[in-house]
Amino acid sequence: SQSSQLFLKVFGLCECHDAYTNGKTGNTKLMDLLDEPVPGVGTYEDFNTIDWVREKSKDRDRHREITSKSKLSTPALLESISDAFSGWLLMLLIGLWSGALAGGIDILAHWLTDLKEGLCLSGFWYDHEHCCWGSNETTFQERDKCPEWQSWAELLGGSSVGASAYIVDYLMFIIWALLFAFLAVILVRAFAPYACGSGIPEIKTILSGFIIRGYLGKWTLIIKTVTLVLAVSSGLSLGKEGPLVHVACCCANILCHLFTKYRKNEAKRREVSYYFPLKTLWRSFFAALVAAFTLRSINPFGNSRLVLFYVEFHTPWHMVELVPFVLLGIFGGLWGAIFIRANIACTYFSVLEVLVVTGATALLSFPNSYTRMSGSELISELFNDCSLLDSSQLCGYISSPDNSNTIPDRPAGPDVYTALWQLALALVFKMLITVVTFGMKVPSGLFIPSMAVGAIAGRLLGVGMEQLALNHHDSAIFKSWCSPGADCITPGLYAMVGAAACLGGVTRMTISLVVIMFELTGGLEYIVPLMAATMTSKWVADAFGREGIYEAHIRLNGYPFLEPKEEYGSKALAQDVMRPRRSDPPLAVLTQEGMSVGEVEAMVADTDYSGFPVVVCQESQRLVGFILRRDLVISLENARQRQEGVVSASLVFFTDHVPAQPTSGPPAVKLRGILDLSPFTVTDHTPMEITVDIFRKLGLRQSLVTHNGRLLGIITKKDVLKHMAQMANRDPDSILFN
């Protein structure tokens, strides 16, 4: 198994009968391999965890060296200024690139989504909305109908009415959806398998220190960007907001390689995880500012606003409405708990499943206008408050002549009731299809589908409350605050609260979710209803399990992620979790002197550990330090190539001074430079509760266990995760990596 990093310093070493001497080196061919940098030393293998402490130490040493040199010459001073400015320049570039990609993805997704229904004759590159904007033959009420935009039935058959036209539009809708989904899954499978899914579970794991080579590479970025547009346009019940996080992280990772201090330090690229200095917060804010400015310049929504679902209404809400808001929170929590369990139980079969789910989605969604439209359009429709000129079915109220500026609550007309049963069917469809869609082998986000489910439920409840208040305004519940002819209930607000509740139930976000909803809608007046529903949904969902969907997928994939919010209450000690156990073979250790190159290479070949403790001698087991397997292998290979005469019989030393060697014998190999002399350790009686906190807060790979300075065993991050899984009655073998 592989290792994860260490805790307290070891004090003192004992003397052994063959302890090292302080004599001079007798062989002139002896060399310390770390006098000059050895290529590969200090780097990490794929699917391994970084050494946070070593990386931060390297960065501090680099910064001290630059600072000291800056006082000696003008070029060094300029280099120091450039180094300090590089972080801000990097944030600027990340913001520009991320904002541009986000705007481009949104514009292309709108165009391809509308392409399933028809084509613009005045320019094939226009989507439906922009095609009719320039038309002089449309009215405000029928602004989506114009001669420049023609459906596929009109283009292929010359008519837009009748059964044959409906069948043509239906078939073209399914064909385009299958084509987009097929292209997306084939591109992902052939060029960038890491481009599938949301990306957030893997991003969280990478930020915690895990290495997944290629996950944030250029091919992943290209394929994820292209296939995200195709997947969203196919009509699948997925969103693009989660995958956009992955896209932005790819941009950041690629740009990091332009700057030495980020390219050569894994911890610097992950500062938002265990180490989050204040300067990183300011730089993150600056990057977000630049990205928002770029997106605003592109104006993908066509309304000169940054928010996706801007709400026009500002009707005040009443305390009585907290009851239905809490009910929406309960619904969101139950939906979140059910969704997570059902989604994790799904098995995915790559291309076949994507095509089957896409075909089923297109086949079932076309007859219902609320499932046919994209998720973003649906949410905008549900968040909308009805005006007098609104032609939507949801606004088909029975109006009475009124000269006032406000629109009072009105009786629902036939169009509203038609819309309600269509929304009820859409709710069932969205709940079922989203379960099997999220996690397929195409880019798939969860924000929009979850919000759509909640928005539908909220709108249904909102219309119900509106009609209840209208017909029972004399009852004790409504009499004090809802007078006849007043605008008492806003169904769009209920849709907004329902969207937040369902998203909170699935992701278990709280404060950040309320901020996100405020940013998406601009509805500052509705912070309290959003908070009430969000907290309720989290409490209800937590009653069935504390994992959000992203944590559940991390566990499903076996990634070594220590969840900061997971509670640990076991009374176990470090000696209960450490290895070796009583039935295990002794711990594989290196001695600081006396072992030959052949013996060290044999130990490396016979084990798969990611590192080895170094002790004074086998008898005393007094700890000297810790050495990583990768560094050891690379250094020994380098010694054979660079140091003349090194053979399997050559002795290996981890000491400052090497005893005189016979001139006739092979030269010794000194590896003191790659030895970690201050490994983190805990005593055998340290409570595991403290040990788990150490691993969480310092991002350790492993911790050695000692008793009075004598090495007893080792606890790796994988051991901690397995132990916590056992305590939670989960399968400990589900942890695949260290």
Image (spheres, rainbow, N blue to C red):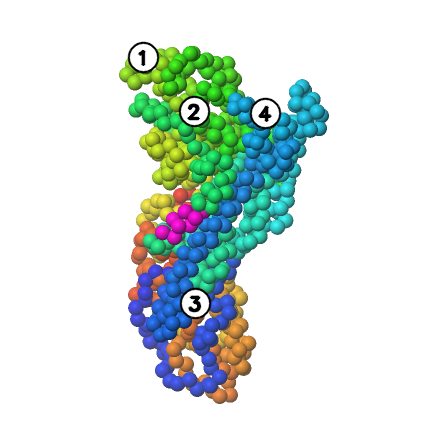
Q: Secondary structure at mark 2?
A: loop
Residue type, numbered disc 2: Asp
Q: Which residues are magenta?
A: 282-291
Q: Nearer the viewer, residue 51 or 67?
A: 67
Distance, label 4 to label 2, CA atoms, is 27 Å
Q: Which residue does the numbered mark 1 point to in the structure image?
A: 475
Residue type, numbered disc 4: Glu
Residue that protrudes farthest toward the right in the picture: 157
Q: Which residue does the numbered mark 4 point to in the structure image?
A: 137
Residue that protrudes farthest toward the bottom in the picture: 663
Residue type, numbered disc 3: Ile
Q: Which residue does the numbered mark 3 point to in the structure image?
A: 627
Q: Earlier in the sequence, mark 4 or mark 1?
A: 4
Rendering coords of residue 179 (x, y %): 65, 38
Residue type, numbered disc 1: Ser
Q: Which residue does the numbered mark 2 point to in the structure image?
A: 385
Front tag of 4 and 3: 4
The residue depicted at 51 percent of the width and 73 percent of the height is: 636
User: Are circles 2 and 3 on residues that touch, CB within 8 Å?
Assistant: no
Q: Residues within 10 Å of mark 3 (few under 14, many from 20)?
A: many
Distance, label 4 to label 1, CA atoms, is 49 Å
